[in-house]
Amino acid sequence: MTKPNSVSPTDRTKMESRATQPAATVNAVPRSDPPRRPTKKPTIYDLARIAEVSPGTVSRVLNNRDKVKAETRERVLRAANALNLKPQVSARFRQVAILSEPTFHDRIEGYAATLTAHLSFAFSRRNIGVVLPSNPFEQLPSLFLDGLIAVTFDKQLQALLAELETRMHVVYMDKFDVAPGEYVVRSDHFNSGYVAAQHFLARGKRRLGFLAANNNAPYVERLRGFRQALAEANVPIDERLHVFTGPNINQLSAITRIVRGGADCVYVPGTSFQAMECLHILTYVMGVKVPQEISIIGGENEGLSAIQNPPLTTIEEPLKEMADRAADMFDQLTSGARVADRHITLPVRLIERDSVA
């Protein structure tokens, strides 16, 4: 019988063996570093502290509100960039800037103005705030935005947009030289030209003129469709009748060239009153009768094209639907949803009136 508090020979052997082992092997339980605390995301209170302003001022800056001094706004935005702070969309009012090239004449009335109005209403219905920078180059750096909608853009603005795409969502309207990763909503400009030419050809026209405000991508796309219809009908293309206006040729000179070239019709694309101006020059400056001597197809300007003399046959672009689809796309992008189709092309419609004989 073993005495109390005595150690048996077997236990004594185990203890002696353990005592002779290296210290590192006595305790076989591996050590682990203390768990790291997750890094805390910066908040507007952190931003307010760093920028030395109140949280209310931070909120006004991040939501593009007024009553904030320019230097204060710049300091808050600089601190926000340093913190890589972008508040969750659900916690604030989403903001989009609608951009158009400052030098384009249709920014106040015409295509850009009409599409901007439709976009503004579309975003308002989705509770997304709209900013309309008068000068994007100067104003965009001082705005906290979720993204941009580009309505019209020259090469300089397009270069700025390409840089901004690395930091925010950009949706382009009527862009045709499109990169795979870009988001675009556009109307079928190729079919605009194709349908216009087909309409002329169906009425026996063979000297088809084309007049565009400039040779940028949307007009080139329409001319491509226009010429495709001529090629399919085996009607020769007279290059003298296809004219782009620009620094060296104004609207009057271009129309004069087309008429003197023997055109029996002219397609004047675009929704910025170019066809109305052409009709006015033909009728009141050159004394040419429309449609008896020359027929015209223009771009639709709702409420105005129908009351010209004669009422204009037009190609209508679905500007309201384009705006709705662009707003839906932007809503999905800023909500983290997947956008199934990055490039959306919507159909156009021919409206027959009395300017084609």
Image (cartoon, rainbow, N blue to C red):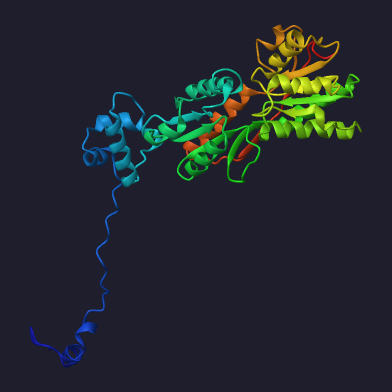
Residue visible at 26% across and 79% down in the picture: 28
Q: Quadrant of residue 341?
A: top right
* Foreground residue among 135 and 287: 287
Give the image location of residue 304, x and y in percent.
66, 10
Q: Quadrant of the N terminus?
A: bottom left
Q: Is residue 331 visible?
A: no
* Foreground residue among 51 and 308: 308
Give the image location of residue 183, x and y in percent.
58, 39
Residue visible at 16% across and 91% down in the picture: 16
Q: Is residue 131 above or below residue 45?
A: above
**Residue 27 in the figure: left or right of residue 165:** left
Seen from this angle, which residue lies furthest front?
A: 248
Q: Is residue 67 visible?
A: yes
Q: Quadrant of the C terminus?
A: top right
Residue visible at 88% across and 34% down in the picture: 232
Give the image location of residue 130, x and y in percent.
45, 25
Q: Is residue 1 above or below residue 251?
A: below
Q: Quadrant of residue 197?
A: top right
Give the image location of residue 263, x and y in percent.
84, 22
**Residue 97 in the figure: left or right of residue 85:** right
